Amino acid sequence: QVQLVESGGGLVQDGGSVRLSCAASGRTFSRITMAWFRQAPGKEREFVAAISWSGGNSNYANSVKGRFTISRDNAKNTMYLQMNSLKPEDTAVYSCAARNGITTSIMTHQYEYWGQGTQVTVSS
């Protein structure tokens, strides 16, 4: 079992930056693959970024590529999402997710553990 808790969301202006954190507990953090997803009002949850258990591989949604950076610190059992050049369309609830295994995935249903989410609002 893995417990995930996000933090770092809030209100930011168009073009601003925010860093989200996801603290994990419950089992060996370094043996799980992690990801960020987001859900805007009235829309389905969508993939944002994922990172392998070692941190050596990552992938991003096209909409955030070049602006967001996913990383993890296995010593601290924490994953991060640095979000730069934010746009109003990035407004959503951001959730971290975890899955057993060493490969990343963009598919929601392949993640077994989820945090409660943190709101990010980008004002224009």
Image (cartoon, rainbow, N blue to C red):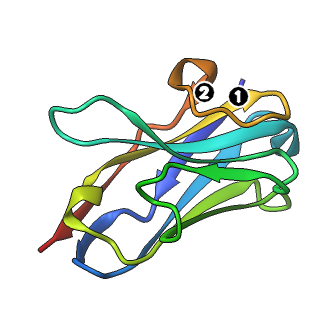
Q: Residue furthest front?
A: 62
Local packing at callout 2 (Cα closer than 10 Å; few below 14, some 14-19, many 20+) is some
Q: Which mark is residue 99?
A: 1
Q: Residue at coordinates 47% horizontally, 52% vertically from top-left?
A: 62
* Residue 24 in picture, x, y percent from top left: 68, 45
- Tell me the amino acid under the disc marked 2: Tyr
Q: Which mark is residue 21?
A: none
* Residue 29 in picture, x, y percent from top left: 81, 43
**Quarter-wise, where is residue 72 in the image?**
bottom right
Closer to viewer: mark 2 or mark 1: 1
Mark closer to the chain start, 2 or 1: 1
**Quarter-wise, where is residue 31 in the image?**
top right
Q: Secondary structure at mark 1?
A: strand
* Residue 115 in picture, x, y percent from top left: 50, 37
- Where 40 sits versus 91, above or below? above
Q: Secondary structure at mark 2?
A: strand
- Where 95 sits versus 99, above or below? below
The residue that label 2 is drawn on is 113
Left or right: 63, with 4 as reference point? left
- Tell me the amino acid under the disc marked 1: Arg
Q: Residue at coordinates 43% horizontally, 76% vertically from top-left?
A: 84
- Image quadrant where one finds the N terminus: top right
Q: Residue furthest left?
A: 124
Local packing at callout 1 (Cα closer than 10 Å; few below 14, some 14-19, many 20+) is many
* Residue 89 in picture, x, y percent from top left: 23, 57
Left or right: 84, with 65 as reference point? left
> What's the CA distance linking mark 2 and mark 1?
7 Å
Q: Residue at coordinates 29% horizontally, 66% vertically from top-left?
A: 10
Q: Are marks 2 and 1 in contact (CB under 8 Å)?
A: yes
